[in-house]
Amino acid sequence: MVAQHLGAMPQTNPLVKSAVFDGNTITIQTNAKGKNCMEALKEAVNACVSVCRANSMVNCCEFCGSHDDLGIYSLAGRCTSICSTCFGKAQTDLSIAQQEIKETKSNVAAGIVGALLGSLIGVVLWVIVYQLGYIAGIVGFVMAICCMKGYEKFGGKLNLPGMIISLVIAVGMLYFAENISLALEIYNQFKAEFDITFFDAFQSIPQFMEESQISRAVFTDLAAGYLLMLVASTSSIVTTYQNANLKHEMKKIG
Ligand SMILES: [Zn+2]
């Protein structure tokens, strides 16, 4: 009955895009965008409320349908109308989940192995991009992510020490990748003229670095790589911390 009335709302009220009733909750979508959105939403909600009142409906808890002890609560950034019993249960569930995360043991040694394996993906990518003649710095972003993901997969969870270890590995491996790229460049340039191996080329890097043109190019590559690594890690540090520790706010609004 009410569902039918609500379903017909988009035809009678141009502001309402859809109104769906699932037994306990009504979900309303509006057509308005930007500045008018709040006004439209208010009107749409009022229109829906009138339909409900006209059909002698009452407020109830979103979770259990109870009519008693209702309140407006903020659950992890979502506003909802539930009873105090269900709110208590939601709080307990969250603290149990938080406790479980706290009790998950992280294995640092396995995490380091994971981060190193992840970093190899970054090293290979760096060398390839460098060989193709592009600025390899963009790989710095990937390198940081690969190390952190590797640590999380192998070490169980990515906590703050894990994040620091991953980033130290990422910084070291990026430097290593730049050196490999440089050695490959030297090897390819001189292998025809002189009878050298890739290892000889790698060992000759310090002599080539005395050349200001080469060292400047290397520092530019590394600077770009480390900058993007910083960008990648800042955003992941924030989201990882929030997700990993379930820092969700729960409180009563009204
Ligand atoms: Zn309830």
Image (cartoon, helix red, strand yellow):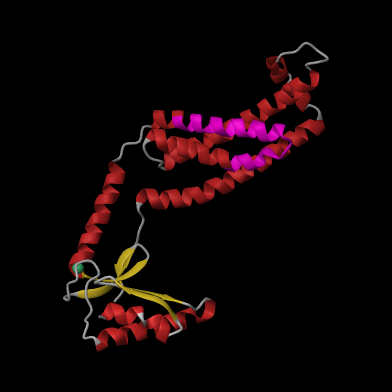
Position in image of residue 208 (x %, y %): 77, 24
Q: Quadrant of the N terminus?
A: bottom left
Residue 229 lies left or right of residue 134; in this view the side is left
Quadrant housing residue 21: bottom left
Position in image of residue 44 (x %, y %): 40, 82
- 227 is higher (above) or lower (below) than 151: below
Of residues 105 and 56, which is closer to you in this image? 56
Q: Quadrant of the C terminus?
A: bottom left
- 246 is higher (above) or lower (below) than 149: below
Residue 104 lies left or right of residue 162; in this view the side is left
Of residues 168 and 63, which is closer to you in this image? 63
Residue pushed farthest right?
193
Q: Which residues are magenta?
A: 114-141
Residue 164: tell me if it is visible.
no
Residue 100 lies left or right of residue 221; in this view the side is left
**Is 82 part of what is drawn in magenta?**
no
The residue positioned 54% from the left and 40% from the top of the image is: 144
The residue positioned 41% from the left and 81% from the top of the image is: 10
Split into quadrants, the picture shows ligand 1 in the one at bottom left
Position in image of residue 253 (x %, y %): 31, 73
Residue 202: tell me if it is visible.
yes
- 167 is higher (above) or lower (below) than 204: below
Of residues 252 and 185, which is closer to you in this image? 185
